[in-house]
Amino acid sequence: MPISELKKQALAVFSGAKNLAELDSAYHLYLGRKGKLTLLLRSLRELPETSRREKGKEANDLHDFLEQQFSKRKQELQKEEFTQSEKAERIDVTAPGKRIALGRLHPLTRVQRAAIRIFGSMGFGVAEGPHIEAEWYNFDALNIPANHPARDMWDTFWLKDSKNSRLLLRTHTSPVQIRYMESHQPPFRIIAPGRVFRYEATDAKHSFDLHQLEGLMVGRDVSVAHFKAVIQKFYELFFAKSMTIRLRPSYFPFVEPGFEVDMSCVICGGTGKKAKNTPCSSCGHTGWLEMMGAGMVHPNVFKAAGYNPREWQGFAFGMGVERLAMMKFGVPDIRLFFEGDLQFIRQF
Ligand code: PHE
């Protein structure tokens, strides 16, 4: 191939290279160890002296020229690739930062912790029990034998039979009373907050999965008066205002006497009315809110736990944590607590 032709070809291939990799192969094709020009230069040795000098100069000039053209093209391509990657990897240092969203405590957790702190200030420790419970702890030991109609008070999720004892999802936190008494000696005072399960339909006031806070205080002379003082103080500290409570006689198999505790309505202040004399819907116009079941521990419960009922007495109570939270924060529907809606949870 004549040198002029080689030159034309090489120049075309160099300028046609679209990126550095292509340019590299073009270089090898002409200027590499086995490149076309390199081979040509080598073949000059065989020419006779006279034409070798002339051709040699021509070929060497072309070699220098192509080396030059190669570096020029290489610089061009490098610049191009740099601007491209600069565009792609550009960091806008003026763009506003992304806010780091901090997690927060669920309102039920906050209420539970507040209750633990308040009862703690009155000397109550915290006890826990399992969600999957034996029939014995949830019912029999609490003076609710099999086939007793009182079992109908709790709609129960039963689990498939395991070998000896029947298992269920605890319907209340009261089984923790038995578990705690089995392994501790009175006098003591504890609360047991936790999750409970009811086999029932849900609506604005009912959930099949909710939380209770159990209380148990046992001593030689613990009375209803102690209970009243502790609970009144609890509500006052929890709602941060003065409160009235009242006890109404009620029935739970594991207490005697048993009562239902009402608290003066936190929304209308116990008047049953709101501004402009409209009825308060939170308390159904009565001025009172039903807050918990309670009573003096039944002798059969002490016996089931291995205590001598002639020696010990005490009170027990069980309150709904959701109900407390609804009253504290003005939440109208219990289902909101379980929907995982961040817009709801972020309000607290
Ligand atoms: N365990 C009862 C319930 O779930 C509440 C309660 C607890 C009543 C302790 C009396 C004493 O309804």
Image: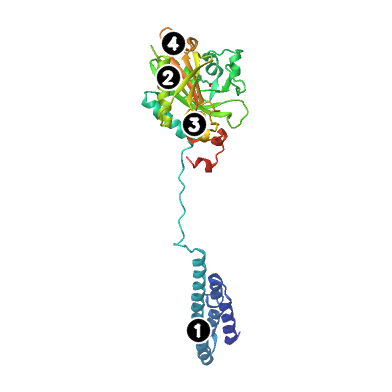
Disc 3 crowd, CA 10 A, few/some/many (<14, 14-19, 20+): many
Q: Nearer the viewer, mark 4 or mark 1?
A: 4
Q: Nearer the viewer, mark 4 or mark 2?
A: 2
Report how far apart the C-alphas of labels 3 and 4 lie in the structure: 44 Å
In-front residue for pair 348/273: 273
| Tag 2 residue | 228
Q: Nearer the viewer, mark 1 or mark 3?
A: 3
| Tag 4 residue | 307
Q: Residues at badges 4 and 2 in contact (C-beta under 8 Å)? A: no
Q: Residues at badges 3 and 4 in contact (C-beta under 8 Å)? A: no
Q: Which mark is residue 211?
A: none
| Tag 3 residue | 268
Report how far apart the C-alphas of labels 4 and 1 lie in the structure: 108 Å
Report the amino acid beneath label 2.
Lys
* Coordinates of residue 300 in the picture (x, y in percent): 50, 10
User: Which secondary structure, mark 2?
Assistant: helix
Q: Residue at x 59, y 16 (%)?
A: 151
| Tag 1 residue | 65
Report how far apart the C-alphas of labels 2 and 3 lie in the structure: 22 Å
Quadrant position of the N terminus in the picture:
bottom right
Q: Nearer the viewer, mark 1 or mark 2?
A: 2
User: Which secondary structure, mark 4?
Assistant: loop
Is tag 3's residue or tag 4's residue first in the polypeptide sequence?
A: 3
Is tag 4's residue or tag 1's residue first in the polypeptide sequence?
A: 1
